[in-house]
Image (cartoon, rainbow, N blue to C red):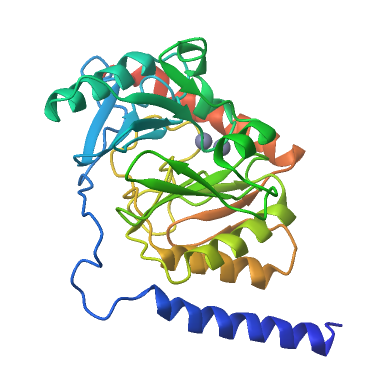
Amino acid sequence: MTKPSNVFRMLALVAALCILSLYSQVPQPNGAGVEPGILPAKWIAGGPKCMEEPEWQIHEYNADLYILRESGCTHYEKPFLYVVFGDEKVTLIDTGAGQNDIGRVYDLVVSKWLKRKNRTSIKKMVIHTHGHGDHIAGDPQFQNRPDIEFVPFDIPTIQKAFGIAEWPESTGKLDLGGRTLEIVPIPGHHATDVAFYDKRTGLLLIGDTLYPGRLYVTYWDQFEKSIERIVRFTNGKIITHILGCHIEQSDTPYLEYPIGSFYQPKEHALELSRGHLLELHQALVGLKGKPTRLAFRDFTIWPLGPDVRGEMSSTRKATEDRLRPKMWNQTP
Ligand SMILES: [Zn+2]
Ligand SMILES: [Zn+2]
């Protein structure tokens, strides 16, 4: 039986969250004082013809923030990467999946930005949302490059690079010159997850912790605590979009593309809102510590275990076997 004190604590928490969520508002719908940006109506989605598909989509959110989407023809994970410019430093967040040429693309984006700004140089950095293979595959292209400050994804290095005193309770900062990203450790999907909050645009870059798709949870307890912490962190802050690193959901509610789908002509938008974060938090509170697969309109909570991994690899193989033979000419 749940102790009355626990019930009271839970009710108090829900009430506090409801009240605090009001503080994420501004008095007038006047843009909230953040730099606006644009998201595309559609991203490249791995087809219909892989010969015609660009390997990367370079999207200008605004003049100082770019989103890169890797093509599904290169790797079925087709992750999103971010390039954020300050006055003194630019950082690439993640290095993509599979065999890619992210080193060339990062250099290209930076050189065009320098031309645009009539500048000759800026310090370059590479960091990660977390250490999964589909976010670090391009790392060797940056390690040992003297012009790049490369931050590997192990916890002590992350703490040192961003000044995170206690992992995962404390937050850290990355000063890019006139633009500071706040960094919040949110382990649970992986051991090394961090979220980046950019006050200038109001964007919360949240890695694989929340996106329109399968939210794989490796460490359930840590995930619960991290979601609680990021909800608290975002209280009172302007959140324009929550941007993750994948799309696996279709544009039909409750309908996903199965794992291994490299071509997704009718996929969900990338951007989610703080409302989705509150929905996820509420679901975790309701599950009372019991790892459970649970589908919502725009995402699915997906606890990982050995049996689940087996299911995922057989689904992935079946999907790839179905799609690969048609990759050069798929039906839209
Ligand atoms: Zn991941
Ligand atoms: Zn991922």
In this rendering, does residue 76 appear at all? no
Q: Residue at position x 75%, y 85% from top? A: 7
Residue 129 vs residue 317, the one in the foreground? 129
In this rendering, does residue 73 appear at all? yes
How many labels were placed on the picture?
Answer: 0
Q: Residue at position x 26%, y 29% from top? A: 57
Using residue 283 as the reference point, say whether residue 25 is left or right of it: left
207 lies above or below 5: above
Return the x and y of residue 154 as percentages of the image width and height. Answer: 66, 30
Using residue 274 as the reference point, say whether residue 284 is left or right of it: right
Return the x and y of residue 232 as percentages of the image width and height. Answer: 55, 67
Residue 323 vs residue 253, the one in the foreground? 253
Return the x and y of residue 294 as percentages of the image width and height. Answer: 59, 60
Using residue 18 as the reference point, say whether residue 284 is left or right of it: right
Residue 321 vs residue 57, the one in the foreground? 57
165 lies above or below 231: above
Q: Residue at position x 37%, y 15% from top? A: 103
Where does the C terminus fall, quadrant-wise?
Answer: top left
Q: Quadrant of ligand 1?
A: top right
Return the x and y of residue 189 as percentages of the image width and height. Answer: 62, 45
177 lies above or below 213: above
Where does the N terminus fall, quadrant-wise?
Answer: bottom right
